[in-house]
């Protein structure tokens, strides 16, 4: 599936005992127009995508009761772009560096370029992680508002930006990447997108925030 623009994925989890129930709701966007003096940069990719209209999928963080009869570790689609998965937490949470290594190892193993750490987007990643750790995942609202209403593309300096977020999982970096974010095809494709070339990761308690970026402006 060709994904254009900013694919924002939220992974929301309600913890019941040892079980996690997670919802994933992506948002597809792209920078609408660059200033007249600044041409939109070309995409770092061997693929020339066809333009598609901006699409937005409303995401509501609604905990889904855990059904003990459901299989472990299998993503179940419960509505458009929304999945649930049952999995057991671990004793130790990943660090941002461990998660970056796990993400790059996974991308390289699957034929995508590794991502380099981008300080320009780290403050934003940290703010997003802190806000959502305190208030719960916000169904893209903060990310959307920053890009659309606060000149976020220009402030962050990139024409394409993406977000992966999870909350409630306590896991190693490898398991967050390969068990959680890779649990269904459309969200796995986002973290494996070859066009992404930069990232910054923030973790606050069990809230994980991964910002993807490409095409500097």
Image (cartoon, rainbow, N blue to C red):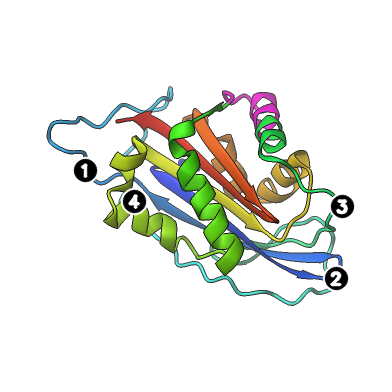
* Distance between the alpha carbons at the discs numbered 4 and 3: 36 Å
Question: Residue drawn at (35%, 54%), measured in percent from left and top?
Answer: 146
Q: Nearer the viewer, mark 2 or mark 3?
A: 3
Residue 68 locus on image (x, y percent)? 86, 72
Q: Quadrant of the C terminus?
A: top left
Label 4: element kind: helix
Does 122 appear in magenta? no
Label 1: element kind: loop
Which residue is the site of mark 4? 147
The answer to the question of whether label 2 and label 4 lie on touching residues, with beta carbons closer than 8 A, is no
The tag earlier along the polypeptide, 1 or 3, is 1
Furthest residue toward bottom? 65
Q: Residues within 10 Å of mark 4 (few under 14, many from 20)?
A: some
Q: Residues within 10 Å of mark 1 (few under 14, many from 20)?
A: few
The tag earlier along the polypeptide, 1 or 4, is 1
Question: Residue drawn at (45%, 67%), measured in percent from left and top?
Answer: 58
Q: Residues within 10 Å of mark 3 (few under 14, many from 20)?
A: few
Pick the front one: 71 or 29? 29
* Distance between the alpha carbons at the discs numbered 2 and 3: 13 Å
* Residue 189 appears left or right of 84: left
The answer to the question of whether label 1 and label 3 lie on touching residues, with beta carbons closer than 8 A, is no
* Distance between the alpha carbons at the discs numbered 1 and 3: 46 Å
Which residue is the site of mark 3? 91
The tag earlier along the polypeptide, 4 or 3, is 3
Which residue is the site of mark 2? 17
Is residue 176 among the parts visible in the rendering? yes
* Residue 171 appears left or right of 215: right
The tag earlier along the polypeptide, 2 or 3, is 2
Residue 175 locus on image (x, y percent)? 77, 44
Which residue is the site of mark 1? 33
* Distance between the alpha carbons at the discs numbered 2 and 4: 37 Å
Range covered by the magenta-colored residues:
103-114
């Amino acid at each position: 599936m060709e994904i254009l623009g900013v694919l924002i994925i939220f992974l929301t989890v309600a913890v019941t005992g040892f079980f996690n129930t997670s919802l994933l709701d992506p948002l597809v966007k792209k920078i609408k127009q660059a200033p007249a003096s600044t041409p939109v940069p070309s995409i770092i990719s061997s693929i020339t995508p066809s333009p598609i209209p901006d699409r937005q999928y409303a995401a509501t963080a609604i905990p889904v009761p855990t059904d003990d009869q459901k299989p472990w570790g299998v993503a179940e689609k419960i509505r458009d772009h929304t999945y649930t998965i049952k999995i057991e937490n671990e004793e130790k949470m990943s660090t941002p560096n461990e998660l970056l290594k796990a993400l790059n190892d996974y991308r390289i193993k699957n034929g995508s370029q590794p991502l380099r750490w981008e300080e320009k987007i780290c403050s934003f990643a940290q703010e997003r992680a802190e806000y959502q750790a305190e208030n719960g995942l916000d169904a893209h609202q903060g990310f959307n508002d920053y890009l659309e209403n606060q000149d976020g593309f220009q402030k962050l300096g990139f024409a394409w930006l993406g977000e992966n977020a999870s909350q409630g999982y306590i896991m190693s970096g490898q398991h967050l990447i390969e068990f959680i974010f890779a649990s269904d095809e459309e969200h796995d494709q986002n973290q494996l997108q070859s066009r992404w070339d930069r990232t910054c990761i923030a973790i606050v308690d069990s809230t994980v925030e991964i910002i993807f970026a490409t095409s500097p402006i």
